[in-house]
Amino acid sequence: MPRLAFAQSFWDGYDTLEKPVRAGVRKAMAKFQAMSVAALNADKGLHLESVENARDPRMRTIRITDFWRGVVLAPDDGSDMFLLVNVLPHDDAYTWAAKRLYSANSATRALEVRDAVALDELTPLYETAARTAPRLLFADVSDGTLRELGIDDQVLRAARSMVDKAQLEAFATLLPEDQLEVLQYLAEGFSPEEVYRDVVAVRRPADAPAEPVEDLATVISNTHARIRLVSGPHELEEMLEKPFAAWRVFLHPSQRRVAYRTSYGGPVQVTGGPGTGKTVAALHRVRHLLGRSEDGRVLLTTYTNALAAGLRELLGLLLDEDEKLLARVDVTTVDAFANGVVRADSAAVCKPIGDREQRQLWEKAVKQLDLPFTAQFLAQEYRHVVLGQNLRDLDAYLAASRRGRGSGLGPARRREVWSGVERFEQFLRDRGETTHLRVCARAAEILADRPAPYAHVVVDEAQDLHPAQWRVLRAAVFPGPDDLFVTGDPHQRIYDSRVSLRSLGITTTGRSFRLRVNYRSTEEILAWSARLLAPVTVDTLEGEGPDSLAGYRSLLHGRRPQVRGYATRQEETEALVERVRTLLAEGLAPHEIGVCARFNLSLDTAEEKLNAAGIPVLRVRGRVAQGAEGVRLATMHAMKGLEFRAVSVLGAAEGAVPFAREITPREADPLQHDADLLRERCLLFVACTRARETLSVTWSGTASPFLPHAV
Ligand SMILES: Nc1ncnc2c1ncn2[C@@H]1O[C@H](COP(=O)(O)OP(=O)(O)OP(=O)(O)O)[C@@H](O)[C@H]1O
């Protein structure tokens, strides 16, 4: 019996096919599993036939229904692997198939596809223009180097005709996948050595022979990132029945490399811009770790309860709802985990209070003790210095470094601060209350005296964790191989946390990886959003040195973001209603549309107006009822980790973004002032990068000062 494989190009369109067409696909594929190659060739219903004038002689079509055809790559070398590459209406199928040429990449050894006809047509046009161009895009890279990176004759000729990145983009849909990626990284300024390491080496099989092997079955099995092999009828049926989630199967090689490395010597760090599949990599790592032992328990944490609920669902999908495996994973937030540890340890547990209540207690302390500080200053000092370094008494505080704080404090002033801290903690004790960070500090203490409860800890959305939270995670797993797997994006830091991981006993040197391909948003949305951060630099995840978004890109294209100011709030809201109406008319489901603003108050107005227009809405506060229909309305903070086909950011106005009240005056503390501004800027970046296809950013009155650079 022949073997069967499915290319990603087929899955890209499969979920949108109508039911009878999908039934036709299932029926046709079942034949491939039931008949010999000779019988397939003779089968009247299947009608396996070659394509006239095809660039690739292995190209075949099969009958799916009266109007639909499957495009199949058939072995012509005696091997027995068939690859379904597309399903299209009859005429389109023949045109598509005739132009495409599949080939094995000489460096990665994976199967790639190009539009050979369009490449032949386009290249000479660009070549003519290139002759008079002052500079060519790949002038610095020799033919020999390009060939070592897998560039073949036809692509080399095209590459030599390109003068800038825009031309490379114009070629993007025509070029073979791995070769395109090589060219894109070179165009971004990465060195050939870096490109070999990050694009070629991660794909090339470890046991690849010196000379490429061309037989289709071998090449197909080298192509994990784009092709799925089917092992039997049961798997086939299951695959074609369920909605297909590409992230479960087709990992980018850089994702696969980090998630499925057998073992790491210690903590691992995976960073990358928004939508680069960090969460996906974390989920696959959990799967890998579960497979490594019979009973090792895994803690998977994220930032909010809503995100934890989402992660639990995705993990169920990835593990095929295998209850035995799922029972070995706790998916939760660090705070909830810490709370559980403290609860299990003592009967009477204090209730954690929120920021606003804490602020009131600090105000009371300042007043009672007549302290020369603002409540805001004391709250920040407590968070960053006292809890950040886990300082337990005055002597420790007097001796502590206040690195990162922008105002000097002599011993007398520190004593005054400490009297405020003691008073604040006394208030909490008197009221039977605590704070989440204090719960974390307590949990870390409890865990330190016990055997670690987990074999592995996987952390998503790590960029916002406070040192007290890191201490809990550190104590939850015994230091050693595969203890911590951490994913995060320092450009999405939206809470005031500063961390030096090394000082907390978490060192990732030699085990830091970066993801660069965005799977969520269009390049237009990404490029626009990335410009919001252009004027600033952010610290790396481990808190040392600057991070960068170099090479960050998307393979998707779409409309440019709409960025617009209105005279009044009312006009802005009316325009929102109109936009949502249009999106719904274009076929988006209400839950695929996200509307966000800096404040809940602005969302109230939007909710009212959308409701009045008969559009269902749902406020995202903590947990969203699953399956409930409605346009999602969320604050920018609540947008963290989410994604929507369309996002509208409202109220991006001066005074709101950044929110003036949240910015420490420069005179009070210049470092905190800058940190506050950066945090607000990142918040806008997070909100905008939730959009998959459509982004609109609006304001009334004067635009946010973060915007003009980007408009
Ligand atoms: N290999 C893949 N193939 C297809 N889709 C993918 C792949 N990896 C990730 N995705 C999709 O891209 C989107 C973003 O992925 P994910 O949430 O993991 O990114 P992230 O880096 O954690 O994002 P953020 O930091 O913005 O929260 C999701 O819809 C996910 O399903």
Image (cartoon, rainbow, N blue to C red):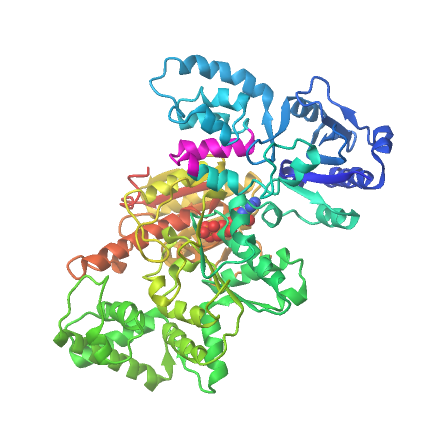
**Image coords of residue 697 (percent x, y):** 38, 43
Q: Examine the rendered structure and indicate whether residue 328 appears above or below residue 313.
A: below
Q: Quadrant of the N terminus?
A: top right
Looking at the image, which is closer to me, 356 or 301?
Answer: 301
Identify the residue shown where x is 65% and y is 46%.
244
**Image coords of residue 186 (percent x, y):** 42, 32
Q: Quadrant of residue 164?
A: top left
- In the image, taking residue 668 as reference, residue 143 lies left or right, namely right
- In the image, taking residue 392 as reference, residue 320 lies left or right, namely right
Query: Magenta segment: does it hold 52?
Result: no
Identify the residue shown where x is 44% and y is 12%.
128
**Image coords of residue 527 (percent x, y):** 40, 38
Q: Quadrant of residue 115?
A: top right
Query: Magenta segment: does it hold 179?
Result: yes
Q: Quadrant of the C terminus?
A: top left
| Image: magenta residue range | 176-193
Q: Examine the rendered structure and indicate whether residue 215 appears above or below residue 154.
A: below
**Image coords of residue 352 (percent x, y):** 40, 76
Looking at the image, which is closer to me, 408 or 705?
Answer: 408
Q: Quadrant of residue 568?
A: top left
- Prevailing secondary structure of the magenta residues: helix
- In the image, taking residue 67 as reference, residue 352 lies left or right, namely left
Residue 623, can we see it? Answer: no
